[in-house]
Amino acid sequence: MGPKKRSRRELHELEDLVAKHARIEESGWTGVNERTFIAVKPDGVQRRLVGEIVRRFEKRGFKLVGLKLLQASEDLLREHYWELRNKPFFSGLMHYMSSGPIVAMVWEGLDVVKTARKMLGETDPVNSLPGTIRGDYCVEVGRNVIHGSDSVESAQREISLWFRQKELQCWEDGSKHWIYN
Ligand code: DAT
Ligand code: MG
């Protein structure tokens, strides 16, 4: 099979995307387009924490580029938590994560991976300071309401696992001059 033939429309869309990225590079705001994968776990959805969590990321100044509510398949969850497959809590974790819908999100901004982890708190809520999401809304490690990527590399892996390219929006942030200098 030869290379995929692209339609004229697809080519135009690609050109637009390249031009948009070139403009962002020119602006000199390197690092501003870092992305992370954030997920409100089934307990967070059940406990009506979606709005509160979205609010915190919005108010911090991060930019929402993808969001959907989905029931995660076992395959997806197994792949997502592949590194933990030999842990004693793995089957409990799979059961918990597939017990209801999850809100999957991609957030963008300067150092968003590291900052999001700080906003989340520690893995075990008992170690999470008040003011963090886990420190404010949960008590047990097996019901810690939210996921956030732990590095830029895992963010890229997780974003491509949970989202298709066309589900991510490239949009002009009208308030960026008030958030970055
Ligand atoms: P994090 O979610 O902070 O990145 P992790 O990647 O080490 O933490 O683990 C993924 C999830 O697995 C975590 O959010 C909750 C669950 N988990 C981790 N350690 C656990 C434990 N000791 N007992 C039960 N569940 C645990
Ligand atoms: Mg992790």
Image (spheres, rainbow, N blue to C red):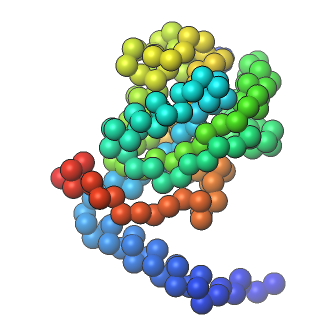
Name the one closer to the observer, 175 or 88. Answer: 175
> 58 above or below 9?
above
**Residue 165 location, quadrant:** bottom right
Q: In this view, does 181 lie to the left or right of 60?
A: left
- Classify 144 as above or below 26: above
Residue for point 73% across, 31% down: 100
Q: In this view, does 14 lie to the left or right of 112?
A: right
In-front residue for pair 51/151: 51
Q: Whole-percent x and y of residue 80? A: 68, 40
**Residue 153: x and y, percent?**
53, 47
Q: Is residue 153 visible?
A: no
Q: In which quarter of the image is the N terminus?
A: bottom right
Residue 84 location (% of width, % of height): 70, 29
Residue closest to the eye, 64 or 164: 64
Residue 136's place in the image compared with 60, above or below, is above
Q: Where is residue 47 in the image (x, y as percent from the top left)?
A: 60, 22
Which residue is located at x 34 percent, y 47 percent? 110
Residue 82: quadrant of the picture:
top right
